[in-house]
Image (cartoon, helix red, strand yellow):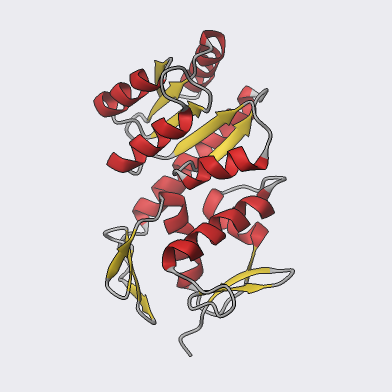
Amino acid sequence: MPEQTVLVVDDEEAIAEAVRARLESEGYRVIVAFDGPQAIAAHAEHKPDLVVLDLMLPGMDGLEVCKEIQRHSWTPVLMLTAKTEEADKVAGFAVGADDYLTKPFSLRELAARVKAILRRMERMQAQRSEGPIEHDGLAIDPDRRTVSVDGAEVGLTPLEFEILLCLARDPGVVLGREQLMDRVWGYRDYAGGRVVDSHVARIRRKLGEDGNEPRFIRTVHGVGYAFQDNG
């Protein structure tokens, strides 16, 4: 397998270098940037397989950087944040972050998250041979990584796309939040339920769902979610 490249963005040099050293010991090629503009330039030049991105950056914060990255590619982003408020994490997911770690974090945990995200991306690539999925005006094309509703294209983040595809592959089957964490993220997180719920809520909004009469994704209270059965 070709060497995978990780872009690490943090204005605290000690943290950036510690992350670099740990990820290089895991066999990754690591590029480091210390502010938002550097991160954008490094992403364009090196086209990394994953970005480890601090939320609080000089010149351009992590949310802006993440949004800019997602405009040009489907590079997964692991957000680092010193903030513990749920709203900050939700904001990161809304602009395309795949996962987050709250500072202070262990380098072992960070390496495990990086590995899990890259494995998910490899799995997504390997599954591109299946045909389109269509249901009640919704069209999901795994090969082109596109989604449309009634002919209008819907812009989903890579993680949102994977969640929708996971549900749509098994119409009518109820998947619990932990099952979705296992299948999509590749691990379980103590806050997994809230993370899954926030992603599903955004997917529904983008698909134009009516909360009272869901057209595509229904909630099974106390359990999880299911894609509407064609039958």
Residue 157 horizontal/vertical position (percent): 41, 50
Residue 73 visible in rendering: no
Name which residue lies at 51% across and 80% down.
228
Q: Nearer the viewer, residue 46 or 83?
A: 83
User: Quarter-wise, where is residue 68 in the image?
Assistant: top left
Q: Nearer the viewer, residue 12 or 175?
A: 12
Classify 181 as above or below 46: below
Residue 79 horizontal/vertical position (percent): 53, 33
Classify 172 as above or below 192: below
Name which residue lies at 29% across and 31% down.
47
Residue 43 horizontal/vertical position (percent): 32, 27
Q: Report the side of 95 relative to 149 (left or right).
A: right
User: Quarter-wise, where is residue 173 in the image?
Assistant: bottom right
Residue 120 visible in rendering: yes
Q: How many marks?
A: 0
Q: Report the side of 69 relative to 53 (left or right).
A: left
Q: Nearer the viewer, residue 114 or 74?
A: 74
The quadrant of the rendering that contains the N terminus is top left
Classify 174 as above or below 163: below
Q: Residue lying furthest bottom in this view?
A: 231
Name which residue lies at 63% across and 72% down.
219
